[in-house]
Amino acid sequence: MKNNWLEQAESIRLENFHYDLPDERIARYPLDPRDSSKLLVYKNGEIEHNHFTALPDKLPADTLLVFNNTKVIPARAYFQKETGATIEILLLHPEQPTQVINDAMLVKQSCVWECMIGNKKRWKKADILATSIDVNGDAVQLQVEYVDYDKNHIRLSWNTDAVFLDIVKALGEIPLPPYLNRETEETDKQTYQTVYADQDGAVAAPTAGLHFTENVFGRLSGKGIKTSFLTLHVGAGTFQPIKASTVTEHKMHSEQVVFTRELINELLAKIDTIVPVGTTSLRSLESLYWYGVKMFREETTEFQIEKLYPYPFEELELPSATESLNAIAAFMDQENLDQIVGETEIFIFPGYKFRLCKGLVTNYHQPGSTLILLVAALVGEDWTRIYQEAMKTGYRFLSYGDSSLLWGKEK
């Protein structure tokens, strides 16, 4: 006999989470200044329109805003074969000598990454691709070769002590989302990056944060609104459309998250007023709660949140948000850890109960995407009214588009 959660999940009709997005409504370039974008505010069924600079006025003074400080790396590179064929490589996730992204950026001489390969049929298993690149004024010889052809695991080797991040910066370009349908330009190096990004490792930006400026941060501070930071290294899977017939069959991508002990304290102090900036921050925070559940239930100390882990539980089986975070804090203190690194593939869709997050600052997402399902989980069926209102009133959509502040439905 199926659990109720599974019956509910399998009853979700994916066609109900599509909407018509004309090509001309996709923002291919950002506004200047960043904070001149529009801001739609949704609360208790009511919608109002503002500019993004008004965000501090729309948040309660005791709010804790939580940002994702990941930084987009120039993860896309092109190699020319002697035959003239061009091979495209997009870095996805480090495999050797470490899978911890922050550490992988500091590796020297050789490393192995899982990659997406463009024009793979022209790059045979035994072929070694080579190029010369300028790294801080030095000519560096770089070679790439398959370690595992079927898994797209690629070894990159270079002949200096330069760290891998320097190699990537010299070699690659910022990988813009495919729906922008244009080449990367020099300005994207700055505009497709939040002003607070400082943890290299993402292949896509946490785009809700692109609207924030020093001016907005100053106004938040002036109102007493606290800000905190976590890291989720956004992967290319964030653009993966749902092709499965039911939500439970969709293959969710796994992304690496990093939380500091300081953040745990800040969350505990503001446990009822947490608002994430972006779906990546939201997924990270909710994953943190479920990691605490695993601790509380003495299941494991490994931080790995599977896509459907949250759903089968009865409410009485679960700790409160405070109990969950305290379990994590106790473990970190016991092990003398300043930070924890984990992986999450949490899938949030209608029927999910939010544990830490009361609202969300976010952009407008692709039709039929997992992120539309996440928004619908937060605001219910009103997501359609929100998107219709944004479309009717001239909002710009997707990564370089306008913003919204969405408050969860009151239970």
Image (cartoon, rainbow, N blue to C red):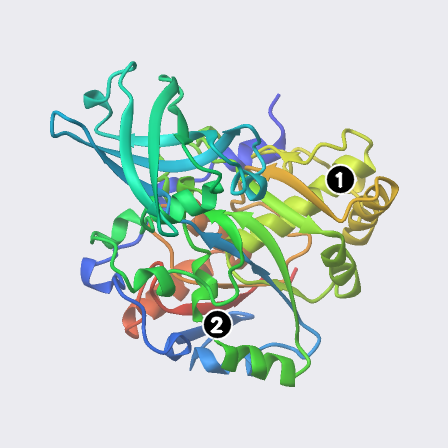
Examine the rendered structure and indicate whether residue 88 appears above or below residue 174: above
Can you say whether 300 is above or below 276 in the image? above
Name the kind of residue labelled 2 in the image: Phe
Residue at 66% in and 59% down:
411
Q: Which residue is drawn at 56% across and 34% down?
A: 307
Image spot of residue 395 (x, y percent): 32, 71
Question: Which residue is tagged 1?
Answer: 293
Q: Residue flagged by tag 1: what amino acid is it? A: Val
Please identify the quarter of the rendering in which residue 149 is found.
Answer: top left
Q: Earlier in the sequence, mark 2 or mark 1?
A: 2
Mark 2 to mark 1 CA distance (whole Å)? 33 Å
- Which marked residue is nearer to the observer: mark 2 or mark 1? 2
Give the side of residue 277 with respect to residue 16, left or right: right
Q: Mark 2 points at which residue?
A: 212
Element type at mark 2: loop
The residue drawn where x is 69% and y is 81% is 224
The answer to whether 39 appears left or right of 407 in the picture is left
Label at residue 335: none
Helix, strand or loop at mark 1: helix
Report the residue at 69% width, 67% height from top: 273
- Residue 32 in the image: x percent, y percent? 33, 77
The residue sitting at the left extreme is 84
Query: Is any atom of residue 49 visible in this view?
Result: no
Residue 299 placement (x, y as % from top left)? 78, 29
Q: Nearer the viewer, residue 166 or 211?
A: 166
Crowd class of label 2 (few under 14; some 14 to 19; many from 20; radius 10 Å): many
